[in-house]
Structures are given as C-alpha cells and as structure tokens.
Amino acid sequence: MQRRLKTTMAEEGSGCPVPRLPWASVLRVALPLFLAGAVIYCFLCTQRLAQQRQLESPGWDMAELQLNHTGQRQDCRLRWQGGPALGRSFVHGPELDNGQLHVQRSGIYRLHIQVTLANCSSSLWATTPHRATLTVGICSPAARSISLLRLNFHGGCVVTSQRLTPLGRGDTLCTNLTLPLLPSPNADETFFGVQWVHP
C-alpha cells in the first residue's frame, strides 16, 4: 500500500501532464455565477416576504375619514367616507358600512375625532341648548353597545378628542351630533379616525 502511494505521488510531482476534463474550466466559471445568483435570489425573496408581512401587519389597520355631508340631517348620526379620491382620507383594514366604521381586527385602537359646527357664531348659541354634544360609541353589535367619548361643546364651535380603547372584530363605531346642529363639511375642520396600536 505504501509503495503504491509513493508511486502515485511520484507521478503527480514528476511534471507529467495529467489530462484535465473539458468541463472543469466551465465549472470554475459556472459555479461562482450560480452561487452569486442564488444569493441574490434569496436576498430578493426575503425582501419581498418582509414587505408582505409588513402589509399584513395589524399595525396597518387604520382609517382617516371625512364627513359625508349630504345636506339637512334627518337623524343624529354622522356619516363618514374615506378613500384616496377624497385626498387625505383612507381606509386600511376597517370598512365603511353605511357611513359607519366597521372594525375587522380586535385590539387596542387610538381613536380621534374633531367636529366643527357649520356657520357657528355666538348668535347660534343664544338659540341652541348648551347640552349640544358629540358622542362616539360602539353601536353594533348590540351586546357591546357602549359610549366611548361624550364631548360637550360648552358654548364653543369645535370639539376634539382622542383616546385609546379596546375594540373587537365586528364592532361598528357610530358618531352622533345633537340635532339640529350641522357639522362643517370641510375636511380640515371635521374628521374622524382610528389606528390599531396593540393586540
């Protein structure tokens, strides 16, 4: 065995040309290119997966809504609208159902609202009861019906507030303004929104 090993080593070191396989030079080029391509492919796949996870993340459940003003109000409920065609308003996750915000994912949400009264002046308050209020609550399902915010105008023209509150999947948020008061349809003065912040 030792003799055979010495013979093989002598042949390798003797300077005799050893026949090379023709595809060995192709492998020297192809293998690094293949490995580089595989690394790039894996990098792009992980980037795409990260983007998909970010878009599916519950943190994207949010909405910023504008008043859907259609003239004289028949009931105390305010109707909202949202979407890119309206400018700064959007809906990602929750849905609008007949102008009311319908929550699709349970969790703790930051809720914010501002309502400015249309044509508001001190003469309005001389004829309007000082009990004029804006309320935000869960109106559906009935078993979870509860008031989340109750804001009094206190003789002013604007109310604004925010709070953190737990909401469940299927909750519908309603906003009510004392009749016959009219909210301003200006999106800078009257808006309503939610943002998911924690499971």
Image (cartoon, rainbow, N blue to C red):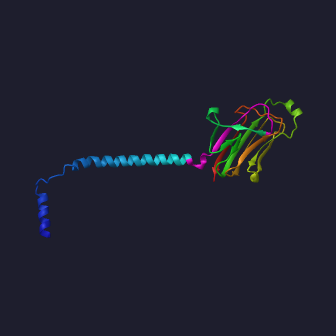
The quadrant of the picture occupied by the N terminus is bottom left
| Left or right for 50, reference 92 | left
189 lies above or below 102: above
182 lies above or below 54: above
| Magenta stretch: includes residue 82 | no
The picture quadrant where one finds residue 174 is top right
Query: Where does residue 173 sit, x and y in percent of width and height?
Result: 72, 45
Tell me how many marks there are: 0
| Magenta stretch: includes residue 67 | yes
Of residues 95 and 2, the one drawn nearer to the viewer in this rendering: 95
Residue depicted at x 77% and y 40%: 77
Query: Where does residue 66 sit, x and y in percent of width and height?
Result: 69, 36
The picture quadrant where one finds residue 60 is top right
Query: Where does residue 5 sit, x and y in percent of width and height?
Result: 14, 66
Query: Where does residue 137 sit, x and y in percent of width and height?
Result: 75, 47
Range shown magenta = 56-76
Residue depicted at x 68% and y 45%: 102
Q: Is residue 163 visible?
A: no
